[in-house]
């Protein structure tokens, strides 16, 4: 079995009286693709924000390759090798697609500059299916292409752990197929990925394991098919969500 | 010592009014109004004019000054600032735009007052009698100004926390989008909050003029003080603003009488830095982000 | 990215020629026009230095007068004992240090805090300097006697402007410049790709402040008699903001487009209608916000893009930086 890449133990985030993440623990092994699922408002995105440093946990520990990262600034965590995409796609509007991707390569875990960074950017754009579109202004691109740029930017730092926050949301069925294939390919190359996702088909076909959250608490964890048939998980979804 | 604290607290009454005006404008109408001090100075001049030419007592004069300032600020908001709110794509852009636009208003109003009154200092004599508190003497005008400020501040508090309209204002301050969903006319509420803020500030100016020597270009200094009070108290926080005003008033008075009167701004800044470093969310504010 | 493009070489040569031509001015006139040119060059240096920081970050800095005054005072205090170039370096250090302190205190927070802090900064430093002078010395004003004449000051300011331009260009090509563009676009993304946003901003603010300090130091011999109120004149800060924004802060040369006409206009107003200066400044601010939100150069760029897209050439040129 592979070594543990990311270990979350009793992570907690409280906003005033509201506890968005309530002592959640789980771990991700190297090369694993972990699904983080749960009904709306269950604290999944907050959990990702705690890992990436967008938010500081109220208490608990998060360790990347054994080194504690909980509470560090986002830029420090990024440099240690955590990259992410955002729930609502965030590209850099004044720049070209290639410059967007370069942004991920220059300051992060891998620190390239000049020709090397440009070269990597074009290579990654090709990987995500945007070959030859590097010089296009990113603002003029379609939603899925912007999502691809964002993914390429996250990959550009060669992260130890990649966080995908509903990266497949908002795609039409044919785009979804492409998107799933892309993530599958990344996982196949041995990348460690945590994905927050609502698209259950994607979770079923992609993930090795999943963690289910509801109202800030981890309610189940394990192989995908048995977890999804766990009665408590079913109740959480049918009880709290209109799905 | 008592002397310093009482003098500081008396001074803080007017500071609190100015800061409350600013915090309403920034908290509800989302405009960081750097021309707020000019409204204050206008309040000073109008109060003096009413007193010296029409012999209207400045306290009674508030009844004229407040509505006039309300109308003028309402017009300023509708004409000059609302277009910026409408065109802003995000909070950051509105911030920069409103800062620059209110700089424009600052210089415009200051310039017009300089053209009218010149750069000289003015004052007039109103209730310049001795009034004893804890055995020390204080100007009666300061005491009366403080009392009037307290009445106005309490009135504001009751308005904000115990009336329908005040609640609407606080709702807009907390979250304009959700306020809109519960059928609050956000644009109108913002305009009224801005106007009300201007009225409070002008009242502060009128009260200040009864015991303070003023001139046409001193507005910026007061804007600065009000801004620091607002940040110290937490944006949109009435109790915080009042407490911060007292802290600032006492700290200034203490530095002026114990060290050197020319270092009052340094005292203000020291407080400001301490707040920025340790409690940027304000005295009563909860840490966010 | 490391080699120069043909366009850059042409702009470089053009720039050098323009500076060389400007440097010949004292040979033609030593009076009114030289004095006007000193003002223009001074504000060109100040506005370009201001834009180094405020352009990419959108933080409106009003600290210019504080940095400038520190530079002036560095020279005024020790001009009798130390060589002038060393004092200019002192000015840069003092202003840079102040920028570092202000930046560390405010640049981690939102833009409003920064503006408010810088708004009173010049006045604060003036109060402290005045108080220290009155407490520890007996003099109020300081005399600065040197052999430097107006044209020397002009040449020094011109050289300073050239150095600021060069620095700005180098920053734009560096990681720091790239980081600033990312921060300007989306600060959250910037942090998540590994940029220490606060440090980047502070470093840039220090560079900008140090240049403004140098400008203040160079100008000290021009004033001859230095008083706190004139060295730390808050109007300087506001005028720099107006001129830089009027020209536009997206391009390095943008501010100069605003500086030249505005200094000439200001000269005209102060001579004929000095009382109307605040009103004119107020109207300028409002005009910028409502009519020229991206400055003159931004407007020109817009028009140029429109023209280009109307021409609608399918061959889009390579625009990668």
Image: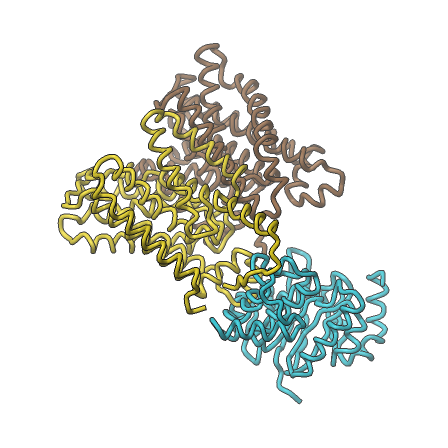
Chain colours: A cyan, B brown, C yellow
Position in image of residue B272 (x %, y %): 44, 46
Q: Quadrant of the C terminus of chain A?
A: bottom right
Position in image of residue A57 (x %, y %): 60, 65
Query: Extreme top residue here?
Result: B54
- Compared to C173, does B185 lie above or below? above
- Compared to B108, does B279 lie above or below? below
Q: Report whether C228 appears left or right of A68.
A: left
Quadrant of the image occupied by residue A143: bottom right
The residue shown at (61%, 38%) is B29
The residue shown at (53%, 36%) is B22
Query: Extreme bottom residue here?
Result: A1
Instruction: Decide which of B168, B267 is in the foreground and name it.
Output: B168
Quadrant of the image occupied by residue A145: bottom right
Residue A51 seen in the current view = yes
Instruction: Decide which of B89, A74 is in the foreground and name it.
Output: B89
Position in image of residue C164 (x %, y %): 35, 54
Q: Quadrant of the N terminus of chain A?
A: bottom right
- Compared to A241, does B107 lie above or below? above
């Amino acid at each position: 079995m592979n070594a543990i890449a990311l270990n979350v133990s009793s992570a907690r985030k409280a906003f005033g009286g509201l506890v968005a993440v309530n002592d959640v623990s789980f771990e991700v092994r190297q090369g694993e693709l972990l699904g983080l699922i749960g009904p709306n408002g269950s604290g999944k995105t907050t959990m990702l924000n705690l890992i990436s440093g967008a938010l500081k946990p109220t208490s608990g520990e998060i360790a990347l390759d054994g080194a504690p990262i909980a509470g560090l600034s986002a830029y420090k965590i990024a440099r240690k090798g955590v990259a992410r995409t955002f729930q609502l796609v965030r590209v850099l509007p004044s720049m070209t697609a290639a410059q967007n991707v370069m942004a991920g390569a220059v300051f992060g875990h891998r620190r390239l500059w000049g020709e090397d960074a440009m070269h990597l950017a074009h290579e990654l754009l090709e990987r995500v299916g945007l070959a030859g579109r590097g010089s296009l202004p990113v603002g003029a691109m379609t939603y899925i292409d912007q999502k691809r740029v964002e993914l390429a930017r996250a990959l550009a730092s060669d992260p130890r752990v990649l966080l995908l926050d509903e990266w497949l949301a908002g795609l039409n069925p044919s785009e979804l197929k492409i998107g799933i294939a892309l993530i599958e390919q990344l996982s196949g190359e041995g990348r460690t990925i945590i994905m927050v996702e609502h698209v259950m088909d994607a979770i079923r076909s992609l993930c090795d394991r999943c963690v289910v959250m509801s109202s800030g608490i981890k309610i189940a964890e394990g192989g995908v098919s048995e977890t999804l048939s766990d009665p408590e998980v079913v109740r959480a979804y049918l009880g709290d969500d209109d799905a | 010592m008592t002397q310093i604290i009482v003098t500081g607290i008396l001074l803080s009454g007017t500071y609190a009014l100015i800061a409350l005006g600013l915090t309403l404008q920034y908290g509800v109408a989302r405009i960081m109004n750097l021309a707020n001090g000019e409204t204050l100075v206008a309040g000073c001049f109008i109060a003096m004019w009413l007193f010296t030419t029409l012999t209207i007592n400045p306290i009674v004069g508030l009844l004229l000054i407040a509505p006039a300032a309300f109308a003028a600020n309402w017009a300023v908001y509708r004409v000059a600032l609302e277009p910026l709110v409408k065109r802003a794509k995000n909070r950051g852009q509105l911030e920069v735009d409103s800062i620059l636009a209110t700089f424009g208003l600052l210089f415009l109003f200051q310039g017009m007052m300089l053209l009218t009154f010149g750069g000289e200092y003015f004052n007039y004599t109103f209730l310049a009698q001795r009034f004893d508190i804890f055995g020390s003497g204080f100007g009666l005008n300061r005491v009366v100004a403080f009392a009037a400020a307290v009445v106005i501040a309490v009135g504001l508090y009751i308005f904000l926390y115990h009336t329908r309209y005040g609640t609407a204002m606080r709702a807009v301050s907390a979250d304009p989008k959700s306020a809109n969903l519960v059928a609050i006319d956000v644009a109108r509420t913002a305009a009224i909050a801005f106007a009300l803020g201007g009225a409070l500030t002008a009242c502060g100016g009128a009260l200040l003029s009864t015991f303070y020597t003023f001139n046409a270009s001193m507005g910026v200094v007061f804007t600065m003080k009000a801004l620091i009070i607002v940040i110290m108290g937490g944006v949109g926080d009435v109790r915080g603003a009042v407490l911060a005003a007292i802290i600032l008033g006492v700290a200034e008075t203490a530095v002026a009488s114990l060290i050197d009167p020319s270092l009052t701004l340094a005292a203000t800044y020291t407080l400001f830095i301490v707040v920025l470093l340790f409690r940027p969310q304000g005295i009563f504010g909860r840490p966010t982000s | 990215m490391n080699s120069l493009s043909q366009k850059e070489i042409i702009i470089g040569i053009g720039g050098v020629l323009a500076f060389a031509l400007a440097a010949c001015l004292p040979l033609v006139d030593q009076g009114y026009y030289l004095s006007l040119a000193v003002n223009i060059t001074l504000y060109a240096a100040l506005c370009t230095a201001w834009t180094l920081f405020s352009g990419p970050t959108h933080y409106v800095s009003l600290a210019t007068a504080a940095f400038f005054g520190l530079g002036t005072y560095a020279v005024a205090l020790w001009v009798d004992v130390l060589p002038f170039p060393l004092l200019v370096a002192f000015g840069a250090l003092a202003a840079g240090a102040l920028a570092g302190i202000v930046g560390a205190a405010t640049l981690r927070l939102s833009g409003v805090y920064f503006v408010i802090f810088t708004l009173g900064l010049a006045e604060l430093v003036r109060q402290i300097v005045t108080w220290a002078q009155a407490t520890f010395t007996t003099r109020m004003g300081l005399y600065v006697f040197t052999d430097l004449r107006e044209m020397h000051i002009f040449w020094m300011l011109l050289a300073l402007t050239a150095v600021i331009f060069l620095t700005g260009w180098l920053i734009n090509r560096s990681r720091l410049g790239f980081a600033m563009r990312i921060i300007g676009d989306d600060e959250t993304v910037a942090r998540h790709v590994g940029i220490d946003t606060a440090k980047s901003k502070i470093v840039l603010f220090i560079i900008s402040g140090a240049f403004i300090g140098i400008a203040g130091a160079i100008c000290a011999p021009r004033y001859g008699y230095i008083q706190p109120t004139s060295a730390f004149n808050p109007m300087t800060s506001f005028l720099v903001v107006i001129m830089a924004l009027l020209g536009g802060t997206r391009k390095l040369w943008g501010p100069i487009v605003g500086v030249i006409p505005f200094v000439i206009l200001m000269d005209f107003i102060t001579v004929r209608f000095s009382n109307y200066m605040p009103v004119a400044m107020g109207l300028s601010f409002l005009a910028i916000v409502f009519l020229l939100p991206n400055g003159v150069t931004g407007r020109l760029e817009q028009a140029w893009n429109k023209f280009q897209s109307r021409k609608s050439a399918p061959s889009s040129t390579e625009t990668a930086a």
